Amino acid sequence: MRECRVVEGIVWVWMGEEAPERGPPEQGDGMEGINAVTGKHPDYVVNDFQIDLPYDHSYLVENLIDPAHIPISHDATPGGGKRENAQAYEMIVDAGSMSTSGFTGRFRTATQREKDDPFIEVIYDAPGIVRQKGKPRGEASPLRFGAALHCMPLSLGRSRLLFRAYFTGIPPLLKLLITMKPQFLANLNSCKILEQDAGLITTQEDHFRRTGGALKDDYILLSSSDTFVKAYRQWLDRVGHGMPWFQGLASRSANVDSHLAEIPPSPPNLDPIGHRAGNFLETRYHRHVMHCPTTRKALHRVQKLKKGMLALTVASITLSCSMATSNQLLSKWNLARILHFTVPLIPVSTLAAAGLHKLEKSFFVSFKRKDQMSAESGLSK
């Protein structure tokens, strides 16, 4: 009995012949009232986002389940944090929660502990969903947020993130400003945040391929920041042997790094500029834009507007030059007034085209794996 449902903006398909024994996993937290078509919620501001990443999905889960890295890795980035706010965390994995279905836990910063603020709940929903929800500013604040982060493998060394974050309890003016921001700009900023981690993560992946060692041999896991990372990798040690590939804290499958041995062929319909993994160059267009209708349409509009501004610049220069060199035209049709209009258009349209070109480039930010950690010789360069 095959069945389709839309849950958390994702289409879930039950492929079994019998009736499903359970439904798709859900966030709860009042998100049941979201409009499945528009993605809007009467109480929450909701942000949905998707990106493909050039590293194994276990590193993606590890990255998203680790809140302590955010102030450092995403310093001064909107939606990130500030380096000066980095601090120790109180992290707890709930006793008895570890099972084949995942685990649960809680965290709060040292500052929040001093104030006796409530914990932020963390749920790892196997095989790759990281959930968070809570009140980051204490019980007295109306602010509440949550996230459902679906991490999935596309193949060896390639992963996809389907991201939903939501919050409520902010002042009406701030909510208005947030909702007025074009969605494609929010998407590009989310790309930037995920890309800030890509260099470090791919370097880690290359390092462990080169050494062939276990993560426990090189990871220094602090109880004040890495409790959930340790729990997740230990969970993989327990259940990973039933997966096509895995990398736990102490064990790993033999094929987990095989995608780094040679550059795989590009998937169908992709520009052979190089796509994901290996040492091929990839761009933000491949990772996000081509999959997201909102960002893709915005790119088309930016490109069309840039062409229009360039055409206006050329037309203004041509018209201004032709009229300025023809006294007969100026006297006959009294076109001098037009010059007062076309000449200022030249710098305005030129600057507009330059600004649009800069914006267009933000849709094509490139990423290439670093060579330094892929071989012993690279370490001495």
Image (spheres, rainbow, N blue to C red):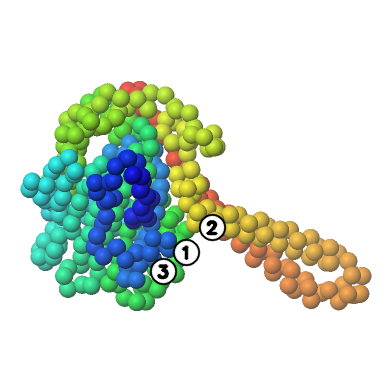
Q: Specify the quadrant of the image occupied by residue 332.
A: bottom right
Find the distance from the CA under tag 2 to the CA under tag 3. Answer: 17 Å
Precedes in sequence: disc 2 or disc 3: 3
Question: Residue 92: where, in percent of width, then height?
Answer: 11, 51
Whether residue 114 is situated above or below residue 379 in the rendered picture: below
Q: Is residue 157 left or right of residue 265?
A: left
Badge 2 marks a residue whose secondary structure is helix
Question: Residue 45: where, in percent of width, then height?
Answer: 35, 66
Q: Is residue 219 visible?
A: no
Q: Quadrant of the C terminus?
A: top left
Task: Give the residue type at disc 1.
Answer: Pro
Q: Nearer the viewer, residue 276 or 81?
A: 276
Number of on-image labels: 3
Find the distance from the CA under tag 1 to the CA under tag 2. Answer: 9 Å
Residue that badge 3 annotates: 179
Precedes in sequence: disc 1 or disc 2: 1
Whether residue 274 is situated above or below residue 45 in the rendered picture: above
Badge 1 marks a residue whose secondary structure is loop
Do the numbered discs 2 and 3 sit on residues whose CB atoms are within 8 Å? Answer: no
Dot 3, how many residues are within 10 Å of its Cα: few (below 14), some (14-19), or many (20+)?
few
Do the numbered discs 1 and 2 sit on residues whose CB atoms are within 8 Å? Answer: yes
Residue occupying the point 23% across, 31% down = 242
Residue occupying the point 29% across, 63% down = 31
Q: Nearer the viewer, residue 183 or 3?
A: 3
The numbered disc on residue 6 is: none
Residue occupying the point 48% across, 28% down = 265
The numbered disc on residue 182 is: 1
Find the distance from the CA under tag 3 to the CA under tag 1. Answer: 8 Å
Q: Nearer the viewer, residue 185 or 13?
A: 13
The numbered disc on residue 298 is: 2
Q: Is residue 62 left or right of residue 53?
A: left
Question: Residue 192: where, in percent of width, then height?
Answer: 40, 51
